């Protein structure tokens, strides 16, 4: 991962250098995390992208996946107790 220092101007604009823009599509999603902003390129074909992501899902019933997610969320919420 390569990082650079960038500045936001008085109008809130951020200049992204050409070498970092290469490979990005014309549209990006901005995802605000706790103390950072993630720039995610919008896929050319979002439905195909979702289809590919879906192929990586485990071969389990949805109810079991939901149960596992809830179990992990509860562990995280309770600090691993």
Image: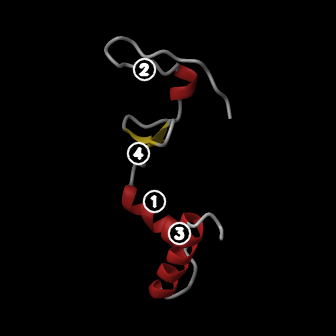
Asked which secondary structure carries label 4, the reply is loop
Q: CB atoms at circles 4 and 3 under 8 Å apart?
A: no
Task: Name the mark on residue 49.
Answer: 1
Looking at the image, residue 55 sits to the left or right of residue 14; the answer is right
Q: Residue 27: where, in percent of width, then height?
A: 36, 37
Residue on which the image places disc 2: 14
- Category of crowding for the residue at label 2, using alpha-carbon neighbours closer than 10 angstroms: few (below 14), some (14–19), many (at least 20): few
Which quadrant does the N terminus fall into?
top right
Residue 45 or 36: which is nearer the viewer? 36
Who comes first in sequence, dot 1 or dot 4?
4
Which numbered mark, 4 or 3, is in the foreground of this view? 3
**How many residues crowd around disc 3 within 10 Å: few (fewer than 14), some, or many (20 or more)?**
few
Q: Nearer the viewer, mark 2 or mark 3?
A: 3
Q: Is residue 4 left or right of residue 62?
A: right
Q: Reading the chain from its start, which is encountered first: label 2 or label 3?
A: 2
Q: Going 38% across and 34% down the picture, which residue do you hit?
A: 26
């Amino acid at each position: 991962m390569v990082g650079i220092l960038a500045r936001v101007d008085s109008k809130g604009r951020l200049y992204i250098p050409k070498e970092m823009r290469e490979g990005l599509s014309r549209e990006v999603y901005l995802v605000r995390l706790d103390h950072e902003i993630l720039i995610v390129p919008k896929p050319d074909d979002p439905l195909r992208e979702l289809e590919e992501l879906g192929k990586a899902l485990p071969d389990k019933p949805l109810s079991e996946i939901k149960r596992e997610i809830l179990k992990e969320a509860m562990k995280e919420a309770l600090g691993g107790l």
